[in-house]
Every structure is written in C-alpha cells, then in structure tokens.
Amino acid sequence: MKKFFLYDRLHKVKAIVLLPFYLFTLLLLGSCVDEEQFEDTPQGNLEALWKMIDEHYCFLDYKHEAYGLDWNAVYNKYKVRVNGDMSDLQLFEVLTDMLAELRDGHVNLSAAHNLGRYWSWYEDYPMNFSDSLYRRYMGTDYKIASGLRYRILDDNIGYVRYESFSSPIGNGNIDEVLFHMMLCRGLIIDIRENGGGDLTNVEKLAARFTNEKTLVGYIQHKTGKAHNDFSSMEPRYLEPAKNVRWQKPVVVLTNRHVFSAANEFVMYMKSLPQVTIIGDHTGGGAGMPFTSSLPNGWTVRFSAVPLYDANKQPMEFGIDPDYFVQQTDEDFQKGRDSLIEFARQFLSK
C-alpha cells in the first residue's frame, strides 16, 4: 500500500506520506498535516521545509540530547542566507546545508539537478572493505542464489555475501545456501557496504538463525506536531522460519556503510545467542523515512518513525560490533581481508 505526499498547483502542503519501499507495512503517520499555503519563493520554500521537519521529523529531541541540536536556532541561522534574488542552485545549497544539521543519512533533498544528502556517517571513516580482496576470496566459481553470493572457504567455513537488501531473496534461495553449507563449522555473513533495502528480506534471512520467537526491538509512531508527541513503544518480534534453520555459530561482518535496513539486520542478529558481530560500528539509520514536497516541487525525504533495539535504545547513530576489527595495510599488501580472517579464526575456535 502506498500513499504519496501530493503537491498541487496552489503550492499547498498536504497530509499524505509515502511508505518506504524497503520496510514492512506500517501504520501511516498518526495525524494529518493541516493544509497550509507557502509561497513558491526562496523564503517560502525554507519556511515549508523547516516546518515540515519541525512537526514530523522523529529525532529532534534525541539529537538535541546527543549533540545539542536546536532546530529553532537552525532556522535563525539559515533564514538570513535566503533572499528573493538568489538562484535555484543557491537555494538548493542553503536548504541542503540546513538539513545536514540533522546528521541523518535518511534525509535528502531531491531536485532535477542534484541530490542533497548527508553521507558523513560513512565518508568520514575507513571503508574496511576492498572489492579487490573480496574477489580474491570469491574467485570465479562462487555460487549465486538470487541476491546471495556464496562459497565454502578452504578451512570449511561458509561465506555468504549480501550486497544489498534491495536484492530479492526467496526461501528456496536461502534453503539452497544453507544446505550447501550444511557440513561447515560456521558461517560468515558479509554485509559490508550494504546500504539497506527491503526489510522483508532482512526478516526472511534473520529468521533462519532463531528457533524461538525473539524480541528484537521496538517502534513508535508520531501522534502530533510537538517534538515529543509519540505513541507508546510497540514491541517487534522475529519469528523463526518454517524452513531450514542454521544451528551453528554465525559471524556478521559490518562496516560504516551498513545502514538503514542493513542496520536493522545487525540489530536482529545481535539479539541471537549464536551470532557474533565483527568489524566496524554500523552507519545507523534507525528512522523510517517518509517523503514530502516543497512548493517548488523539490522532494524531501526525512525520518518520521523511530526504531529502537530490544533494550529500547535508539540505533540512529549505529550499532557497535562485538569485536572491533579494521582492515590493516599490512594485511592488504598480503592480499588478506583482516575482517574475514578474524572471523575465520573466531569460528575455527
């Protein structure tokens, strides 16, 4: 089910939202946005954007506590940069800078000429992933089961690479992978550089590693315009799959580019006793994004529904691994992936 935040010719902002394509079916925003008219001018577009975030963005209070974000002060800071003589390119830069104050990779401003984004959550950190090293481990005879690429390493450790949760996987695909790995001592699931995708695929894969219904987190919904207007926390559970389930140790490899639905996968797996997270702190992205429009037609995506882990803690800024491991220059020169090698040694024990 999809509903779109419509933009009519009178430049009115209306109460309609777009459910994110990669997440399961959820309730729409708890309350509608009252119709309000904003002029299609630089000042009108800034006002519309600031108010949209002020009333519907879900992490304003949390980010005020985390790093002192003051959304009112942000308005005063950027309104003086806007004037009626500025070009669309100049306005786009100002609005993008204003949104960057949220430090949220789910917040984007889209126009025909550019995509305004905040990517410092991974650009300012080591990659801890090398495509050339990955190819050395995989060779050319690896197997492909829809979105999953896999092989058995020479120490009888299974290795599965899932590059994006946007790539579909079926239960039959997962069955074939796990049957192929049946005699392995352990399993590595590598989701480094996975920026998210469809939460259905997250649940489908994670369900193969639990034998009982498991509490994995909580969700809230916005119920009003105030920054703290939310519903009570609703629990979220992972149900065990009815198909083949893996009973041996599992390692999930992460880096800073693990974001959004991939971050959710790490949260799910971290709740399971036989799973160990190895690598870097994930990128985060724990707010479900919704989409709206400005008077000039530019599209805005922003986090509207907050998600929490099983301890009711926000994951917006990412998840720590159980073992923090980075790629070393020495290993790279030797053609070794430091994270894969650490995981192999861990599983061999």
Image (tube, rainbow, N blue to C red):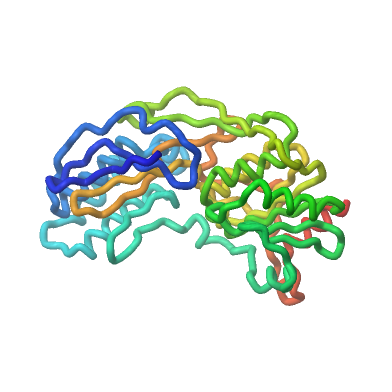
137 or 313: nearer the viewer: 137
Question: Can you name the residue that lies furthest to the front here?
Answer: 172
Q: Is residue 101 left or right of residue 130?
A: left
Name the residue rendered at 22%, 44% in the picture: 48
Going 72% across and 40% down the picture, which residue do you hit? Answer: 243
Q: Residue furthest top?
A: 232
| 191 w.r.t. 245: above or below | below
At horizontal 26% and vertical 57% (from top left) the residue drawn is 94
89 in relation to 239, above or below: below
Judge from the rendering whether residue 185 lies leftward or rightward of residue 174; answer left or right.
right
Q: Nearer the viewer, residue 334 or 303?
A: 303
Q: Residue at x 23, y 65 (%)?
A: 89
Please state the horizontal and vertical placement of residue 76, each as a whole percent of the image: 23, 46
* Rendered view: 157 above or below 57: below
Residue 135 at what x, y percent from top left?
Answer: 69, 72
Q: Quadrant of residue 114?
A: bottom left
